[in-house]
Image: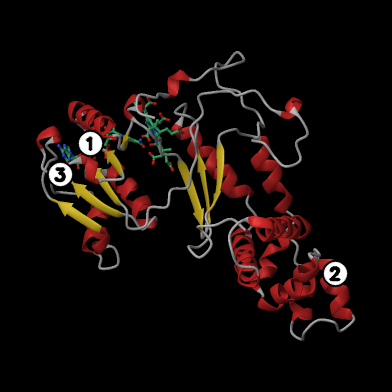
């Protein structure tokens, strides 16, 4: 990554903007090479970094540093902040607030670059947000010498990673990147996505997380035949229930029913199956009311999600980061 820049992308069309429209990586359903899309270079690799307790160096104490700090605190990182007082008030607040103070080590002084006793190689990521271009360049050079990933706010050639416009609803996180083309436009697109999301999206993601967690208790382990069956079953369940109804998985009795009556035979029970079984008194008590509620309480906007996300912009990362109990393995 060091040395890369957003201007090195190959491009097509009259705009010069890389056109990877609807390009997708390989899937199981592919049959042959005619399915392989051409590679259009120049994209960023969009990831969901897991930074809990990781050491991050943040240089600067103004508004932009306060925004970086906010996202780093939310990711449970440990931040060494180097900047002389006075700090942006929200940074000072986080340092003083007992709920976040232990996540921050503040060094109340200017960073001295190459001469500084704090070395960039002690950190997983480095970010600068300072009004000193020469020092920013020096920090960038130091990081590239030590192969530490760096973001220098507002100076794309000195960035190994860019920030993007973000939104978070519990475990659901979405980041919009315009590849450096227009951060303000990115924030506007983020607001459109926010508007398009169904009201119950957070509950849907939570619900599916709980179901995956219960399934893993019944079928533990990583990989192998069982892992493949688990993934196929989960895919089938997700497709059958759809985003609008996944919030029902937060109901323990619904989870138990589709696991008890579906998983052993690798059968996919949908909401309709649950209803007819309820009517036939085949389901343990308690689930009928909630199942009926879920069927009547459809969110008509749910279909906007897939259409909206797929249709209007490339460079949208949908990063669904489930709780830590789910984060290390795929099911
Ligand atoms: C998304 C966001 C995230 C964040 O920083 O947290 C972000 N910039 C934000 C705001 C913003 N930045 C600027 C404006 C003024 C209006 C405008 O230019 O549009 C506004 C709008 C505002 O303030 O509302 C000025 C600006 N920014 C960069 C340059 C340099 C250049 O383009 O060469 C210049 C021109 C400097 C000049 O003219 O001198 C560069 C970068 N800014 C990025 C991210 C990365 C690319 C993101 C992407 O690919 O989309 C990248 C490459 C590197 C980086 O800093 O990571 C955050 C919105 C968050 C939110 O609202 O939620
Ligand atoms: N990417 C973005 O979203 C975005 C948006 C606006 C501005 N910027 C850029 O980010 C930079 C910071 O913006 P800001 O609004 O936070 O600026 P600011 O002037 O409010 O803050 C600069 C901070 O850097 C600190 N600083 C200066 N020299 C330092 C040193 N040697 N060591 C440690 N700290 C030092 C200052 O004390 C101050 O706290 C600017 O270069 C600006 O162009 C980026």
Name the residue furthest front: 224
Quarter of the rendered structure image containing ligand 1: top left
Q: Which residue is mark 3?
A: 118
Image height of 107 relative to 294, above or below: above
Ligand 2 contact, mark 1 (Cβ < 8 Å)? yes
- Looking at the image, residue 218 sits to the left or right of residue 270; the answer is left
Upstream in the sequence, badge 3 or badge 1?
3
Expressed as whole percent of the image width and height from the top left, the position of residue 129 reads 26, 38
- Looking at the image, residue 321 sits to the left or right of residue 212; the answer is left
Which quadrant: the N terminus?
A: top left
The reply to whether callout 3 and callout 1 are in contact (CB within 8 Å) is no
Q: Secondary structure at mark 2?
A: helix
Which quadrant: the C terminus?
A: bottom right
Q: Nearer the viewer, residue 232 or 241?
A: 232
The reply to whether callout 1 and callout 2 are in contact (CB within 8 Å) is no
Q: Quadrant of residue 19?
A: top right
Image height of 19 relative to 289, above or below: above
Residue 149 visible within the image:
yes
Q: Secondary structure at mark 3?
A: loop
Expressed as whole percent of the image width and height from the top left, the position of residue 8 reads 45, 19
Expressed as whole percent of the image width and height from the top left, the position of residue 105 reads 20, 55
Image height of 83 relative to 240, above or below: above
Q: Secondary structure at mark 1?
A: loop
Q: Which mark is residue 273?
A: 2
Disc number lying in front (3 or 1) = 3
Which residue is located at x 34 percent, y 47 percent?
A: 67
Which residue is located at x 81 percent, y 68 percent?
A: 265
Q: Which residue is mark 1?
A: 130
């Amino acid at each position: 990554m060091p040395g890369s820049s957003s201007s090195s992308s190959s491009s097509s069309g009259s705009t010069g903007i890389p056109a990877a429209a609807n390009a997708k990586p390989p899937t199981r359903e592919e049959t042959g090479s005619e399915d392989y899309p051409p590679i259009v270079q120049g994209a960023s690799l969009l990831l969901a970094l897991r930074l809990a307790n990781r050491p991050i160096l943040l240089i600067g104490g103004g508004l932009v540093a306060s925004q970086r700090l906010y996202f780093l605190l939310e990711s449970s990182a440990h931040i060494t902040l180097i900047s002389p007082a006075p700090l942006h008030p929200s940074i000072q607040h986080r340092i003083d607030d007992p709920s976040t103070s232990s996540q921050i080590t503040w060094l109340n002084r200017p960073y001295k670059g190459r001469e500084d006793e704090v070395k960039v190689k002690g950190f997983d990521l480095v970010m600068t947000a300072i009004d000193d271009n020469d020092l920013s360049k020096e920090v960038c050079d130091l990081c590239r010498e030590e192969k530490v990933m760096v973001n220098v706010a507002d100076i794309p050639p000195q960035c190994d990673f860019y920030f993007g416009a973000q939104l978070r609803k519990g475990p659901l996180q979405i980041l919009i990147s315009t590849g450096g083309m227009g951060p303000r436009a990115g924030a506007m697109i983020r607001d459109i996505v926010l508007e398009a999301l169904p009201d119950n999206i957070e509950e849907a993601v939570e619900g599916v997380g709980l179901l995956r967690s219960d399934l893993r208790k019944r079928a533990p382990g990583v990989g192998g035949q069982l892992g493949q069956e688990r993934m196929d079953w989960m895919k089938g369940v997700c497709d059958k229930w759809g985003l609008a109804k996944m919030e029902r998985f937060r109901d323990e009795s619904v989870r138990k029913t589709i696991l008890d009556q579906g998983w052993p035979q690798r059968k996919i029970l949908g909401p309709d199956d649950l209803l007819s079984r309820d009517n036939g008194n085949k389901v343990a008590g308690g689930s009928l009311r909630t199942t009926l509620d879920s069927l009547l309480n459809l969110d008509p906007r749910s279909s906007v999600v897939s259409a909206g996300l797929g249709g209007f912009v490339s460079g949208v990362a949908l990063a669904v980061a489930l709780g830590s109990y789910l984060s290390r393995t795929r099911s």
